[in-house]
Amino acid sequence: MNLDQVDLGSLYRVSEVIVPKGAPQIKGQLEDIGFLPGEQVSVLRKGLLGKGPYMVRVGASTFALRASEARMISVECLLHV
Amino acid sequence: MSESKVHFFSNEPIVALLGNPNCGKTALFNLLTGSRQKVANYSGVTVERKEGRLTLASSKNVRILDLPGAYSLYPRSLDERVTCNVLLGRAEGEKRPDLVICVLSAMNLRRNLRLVLAAKRLGLPCVVVLNMLDIAKRQGLNIDTAALSHELGLPVLTSVGIQSDGADEIKSFLSNLDWRNLSPLQSGTSDATLENVASHIAHTESDNVQVQKILQNLKLDQIIPDHLSDRLDTVLLHPVFGPIILVALLFFIFQAVFSWATLPMELIKTTVEFLGGQISELLPNTWFRSLLINGILAGLGGVVIFLPQILILFFFILLLEESGYLPRAAYLLDRVMGSVGLSGRSFIPLLSSFACAIPGIMATRSISNSRDRLVTILIAPMMTCSARLPVYALLISAFIPERKIWASIDLQGLVLFLLYLAGILGAMGVAWILKRFTSEQFKMNALMMELPSYHLPRLGNLAISLWQRAEIFLRRVGGIILIMTIALWALSSFPLPPEGATGSPIQYSFAGMLGEALAHLFSPIGFNWQISIALVPGMAAREVVVSSLATVYALSSSSADAADALIPLISAGWSLATALSLLAWFVFAPQCLSTIAAVKRETGGWKIPVIMLSYLFGLAYLASFITYRIATALGLA
């Protein structure tokens, strides 16, 4: 499952960051801001009609990600609410 | 006006502050250095360099360098590249720091600690400072600094960036430091090199494991959410109420910028006119008096007159920035901006451009994506800056009848609103077209923006930043505007009219000749030769067109009510089609040379300013042509 498909408020764990070919630098960028395997992540908020940008909490910090960016982060569920 | 490299005290040790964005580093920097700061640019790049001086209790002086915030030491943005180069001693004109203070937000150790591990590898002497300890304690987070220090093998100090004595522990640590031998704070060798991709990926993984272990040992691996910020966000980022609050806030800021600035602007104007009057009484009527009044004094006045608006606007922007709301505004607007290929980050520069395009263009530095930054710079001049207002006011009151059209909306106000709207739509259109020409690759990595916790802004920090903005505006832009005004004064004054000339003197000057040549170019869009001549000195600043028109029509140019005297003249002399065409021209025209100069400075070359000049000129001509032709066809001639 990718981060753009998760339920609001549920807790997930990052399993890996998969980026499309042609944009290798974006993987490192996502990792630098904390999207690393094992990190806890949850989507706190979506835009109107469930579209991006998403407000995502990873570790203790909060980031705004676009749907295309969230799609690159594959996650597994830890705690479903 | 070149940015000098600041090396006044080269024998004093340099202490660099390193930290993630939003770790409270700049507040700490302000605490350490107070007002003894110097803001310049790093050599060759438009990244702000902040240095300050701290006198220790031992009466030794140290230089404190506030490095741009970085998430890692693998450079991805211009800011991060500068930080890396300085730390490696590779930045041009920079001495390698003697000591690195790693500033950590106690609220976000997980991500911040990774940067400490990367900094340790550089081989520079390092100290760790745990900042925001007050918030952490309030939230029930107890950090054992001794244990953390043991885990990292570095001294760990604590600080509270929002208390006036919050940096005392750092100050006393620096006082007691043996500056001749800092090697106890050093780990590894100092033959540091920039991390390559492979080693960076390897380090990211191993660092993450190590950080995880440290946090487990300190029993800090649970995450404590910030309930207050989350509660505020449920309202401020609500899909419906969020945008409404944002619009209300922007509306308030806007009207504050214009209404609060009226009084100081009037005051500046009156002072300039008073001084001009004094000079004309004291000196005989020669070209020298004209230089003093119409060149130098007008140039200085033209610079200072915008200061009130810019300061008020920046006050609000800084307030929103310090409180943590600004990235949220960008978040709310990302979808709108995304539809034309920009990101929410472009919003602030464009907002600033409504006061003046120059601070707006300067504010594009915060946009990490270089394509987005360029596009934002290119469209910023289309936001209706306040210098257009006097021109709009003149034309609207001369040609648009004062008439209520519907409820409380009157026609003049509606036209003014449409002019603002035309600028915004034009900018969005250009951004949208540029999006078509951008390859997929550059469209990536657009947002990824941190939304920090909300903080109560501190007035001291606001005052320091506001002062720095004002200084930058006056220093970098003031000189340009002044020079341009004097140059255009010379163009409009020489050569002097021949003996017995009947027309106004400007007709015989270089500007007059240029204007008459331009009149051929401008006649298809309905401009007469008077307008064409007035547009030439108007290149200094848009509002100058009003006084230039007065000059061309041989009115006394120094009289304060030039506009009032002009209204009957032009409403009798010009057709409505010409007036509408001129309004359309002003929406898009690349009128002020200072903006072009600012763009050249910010983009480091002539390419972008030339592109901007030509496309804005084309757009303005097209808009005026269409307006004039339609108006003529409708019989408004």
Image (tube, rainbow, N blue to C red):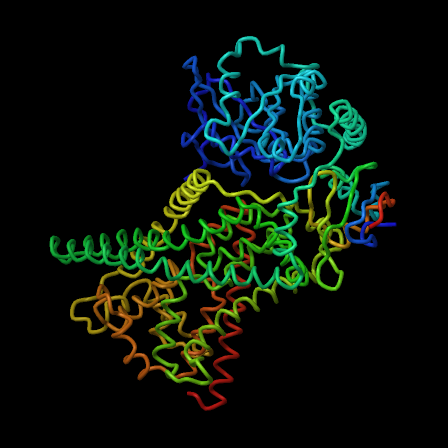
Q: Position of residue B463 (x, y in %)?
A: 42, 41
Tell me if residue B286 comes above or below residue B207 in the rendering.
Answer: below
A12 with respect to B139 (left or right): right
Tell me if residue B332 comes above or below residue B169 in the rendering.
Answer: below
| Residue in the picture at 83% in, 37% down | A37
Q: Residue B416 occupies which quadrant of the picture?
A: bottom left
| Residue in the picture at 51% in, 59% down | B249
Q: Position of residue A15 (x, y in %)?
A: 86, 40
Which one is in front, B152 or B587? B152
Which one is in front, A19 or B314? B314
| Residue in the picture at 14% in, 58% down | B285
Q: Position of residue A34 (x, y in %)?
A: 74, 38
Q: Position of residue B225 (x, y in %)?
A: 69, 41
B95 with respect to B488 (left or right): right
Tell me if residue B152 comes above or below residue B627 in the rendering.
Answer: above
Residue found at the very far bottom of the displayed protein: B635
B549 with respect to A41 (left or right): left
Tell me if residue A45 comes above or below residue B217 in the rendering.
Answer: below
B151 with respect to B522 (left or right): right
Quadrant of image for the C terminus of chain B: bottom left
Q: Residue A49 occupies which quadrant of the picture?
A: bottom right
